[in-house]
Image (tube, rainbow, N blue to C red):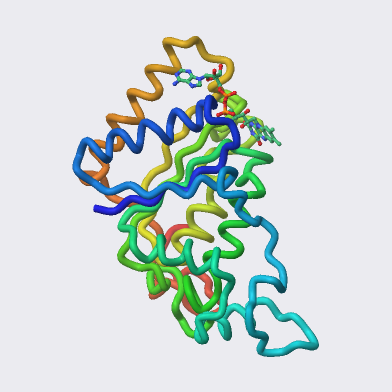
Amino acid sequence: MKVLIVHAHEEPRSFNAAMKNTAIRVFEEMGHTVVVSDLYRMRFKAVADSDDFLERKDRHILVRQAEERYSTNLGTLAPDILEEQRKVLDCQLLILQFPLWWFSLPAVLKGWVDRVLSMGFAYDQEGRWYDHGGLKGRRAMLSLTTGDPESCFSPRGIHGSMDQVLWPIQHNTLYHCGFEVMAPFVAYAVARRSQAEREALLQAYAIRLRGLDGEAPLAFHPLERYGDGMQLKAGFEP
Ligand SMILES: Cc1cc2nc3c(=O)[nH]c(=O)nc-3n(C[C@H](O)[C@H](O)[C@H](O)COP(=O)(O)OP(=O)(O)OC[C@H]3O[C@@H](n4cnc5c(N)ncnc54)[C@H](O)[C@@H]3O)c2cc1C
């Protein structure tokens, strides 16, 4: 199996880096091939702008999704986007490794999503989305750390449940592009834990990754269950 880890932490001695290194070690021990996009080290360009298109469909007005589709067809997206898209196409498992920032992705990783998972490549408006998405046949998983403890992310917790927090990334982004999404691995409140607790977290992550093939993905509704206005049909629970 080929695994792509997209890593979004600047500090090589961070807990996120330790999680990334754990995943590399576990997958390589299992005989898998691991490719890492270390976004800070690559100085990955996070801002989606007109420089992303070597040719323009329309030089007068920038309509990003139209240009994405046009450049995808011509093969004229910027080389760094094409390189990341090649890695995505080549993998069977994508792991996004990041610290939770403002209940979302750090900007460099959001930029990777904005620029790499482009229209015409990962999805389009002709029904190639969700379980028909362009990257169907691949699995994806979030591996993240938080500042706050798990209790804050419980159903009655102040931030809302972690499922709610991650819904835009897991359902509306990864599943939208066709990935089967595995349950996330969340290392809560890493800076507030003891060294022994943090080491136990890394061990738990290693065990989780070793058993990943035996897990079912998160159960999201397929497109066929949505009717008028893309509303869930009667008889199905949100
Ligand atoms: C802009 C911003 C927004 C944020 N928004 C949120 C938010 O919305 N919600 C939220 O909950 N938090 C938020 N935070 C906090 C953030 O999520 C945490 O600071 C981050 O998740 C901690 O992960 P880290 O890898 O940076 O930890 P680090 O600070 O790098 O590491 C934590 C500890 O682990 C130790 N460590 C490193 N490697 C190992 C190892 N191999 N074994 C054992 N210990 C090790 C480190 O030495 C350190 O003591 C935000 C922070 C910022 C800067």
Q: Residue at x 57, y 57 (%)?
A: 112
Q: Residue at x 34, y 56 (%)?
A: 139
Q: Residue at x 64, y 71 (%)?
A: 52
The location of residue 95, given as percent across then percent down, is: 42, 47
**Image quadrant assignment for residue 40:** top right
Q: Residue at x 27, y 30 (%)?
A: 207
Residue 218 at least partly seen: no
Residue 203 at least partly seen: yes
The location of residue 19, given as percent across then percent down, is: 43, 31
Q: Is residue 190 above or below residue 89?
A: above
Q: Is residue 166 above or below residue 48?
A: above
The location of residue 228, given as percent across then percent down, is: 53, 80
Front-lying residue, 198 or 50: 50
Front-lying residue, 156 or 176: 176
The location of residue 50, given as percent across then percent down, is: 72, 73
Tell me: 11 left or right of 73. Answer: right
Tell me: 54 left or right of 198. Answer: right
Ligand 1: image quarter = top right
Q: Is residue 136 above or below residue 53?
A: above
Tell me: 60 left or right of 53. Answer: right
